[in-house]
Amino acid sequence: METSRPLAVVTGASSGIGLELALQCASNGFDLVIASDRSQAEAEREIRARGARVRSIIADLGTEEGVEQLVGAIGGARVDALLANAGQGLGKAFLDQDFEALRHIVDTNITGTLALIHRIGRTMRDQGAGRILITGSIAGFMPGTFQAVYNGTKAFVDSFTEALRNEIKDSDGVTLTTLMPGPVDTEFFARGDMLDTSVGADPNKRDAADVAKDGWDALMSGKASIFSGWKTKVQGVLANVTPGSVLAEQHRKMAEPGSAED
């Protein structure tokens, strides 16, 4: 994609946090390449309404083909910001879940994210400039009873970003920021079949626009990480001093199927 303005690549941009991150980019002078596994027509309209150019790719970023499709859409353009937000969740007990669905969660949240960061991160290092934002989660700080695989993937992402940040600390001009939200009012819970859980039915989840603004501000200031919202910050602190068995039981109360009715 040819552009005279800085270029941002945003994944998972069809709705929720990803859409709001894309709108932050558009409102702050970036053109965009956006990718999701479903139509982004509404996202395209909103981005263009903010004066930005956008190229939209429908691709499954949990597959090699999907990652290659996105990289091909970028072409030889210089990427100034990568906002790796694509991710999926799945509720209910691990032994009752479909294994192929579980595998796809891992492939999307971990493998596809790593592949994209590896490709674009290398280019940023070579060009001596670039900003990367990875959407992690407070879920990575606690054993995810009834969300075991999702929380496990986010634990990986949270750990990976800390390690990669240290590896590139001497790469002048390249920054890596981790956005760690708590529960957010998005389609995540509906797509993950978690609307019958206490956390899924909670009407007080954070607004995606507020979370994206936190992430954007942290990205542009070069912060290492940001817990979005004071409740999330408190959860992060407590998770570091609370036994895993206790955290697992607490998570059970939030994510157990049918807990919304308790």
Image (cartoon, helix red, strand yellow):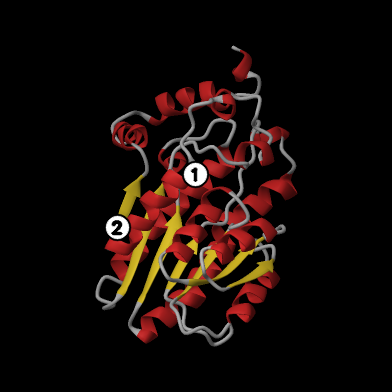
Judged from the image, the secondary structure of the residue bearing numbered disc 1 is helix
Q: Which residue is mark 2?
A: 224
Which image quadrant for residue 173? bottom left
Q: Residue 39: horizontal and vertical position, in percent?
A: 72, 59
* Badge count: 2
Which image quadrant for residue 150? top right
Q: State left or right for residue 72 relative to residue 233.
A: right
**Circle 1 crowding by C-alpha within 10 Å: few under 14, some 14–19, many from 20:** many
Q: Amino acid at mark 1?
A: Ala
Judged from the image, the secondary structure of the residue bearing numbered disc 2 is loop
Q: Amino acid at mark 2?
A: Ala
CB under 8 Å between discs 1 and 2: no
Q: State left or right for residue 64 relative to residue 83.
A: right
Q: Residue 221: horizontal and vertical position, in percent?
A: 27, 61
Q: Residue at x 59, y 31 (%)?
A: 146
Q: State left or right for residue 234 relative to residue 86.
A: left
Give me the disc on residue 50.
Answer: none
**Circle 2 crowding by C-alpha within 10 Å: few under 14, some 14–19, many from 20:** some
Question: Residue 10 or 193: which is nearer the viewer?
Answer: 10
Question: Residue 160 or 222: which is nearer the viewer?
Answer: 222
Q: Which residue is mark 1?
A: 208
Q: Nearer the viewer, mark 1 or mark 2?
A: 1
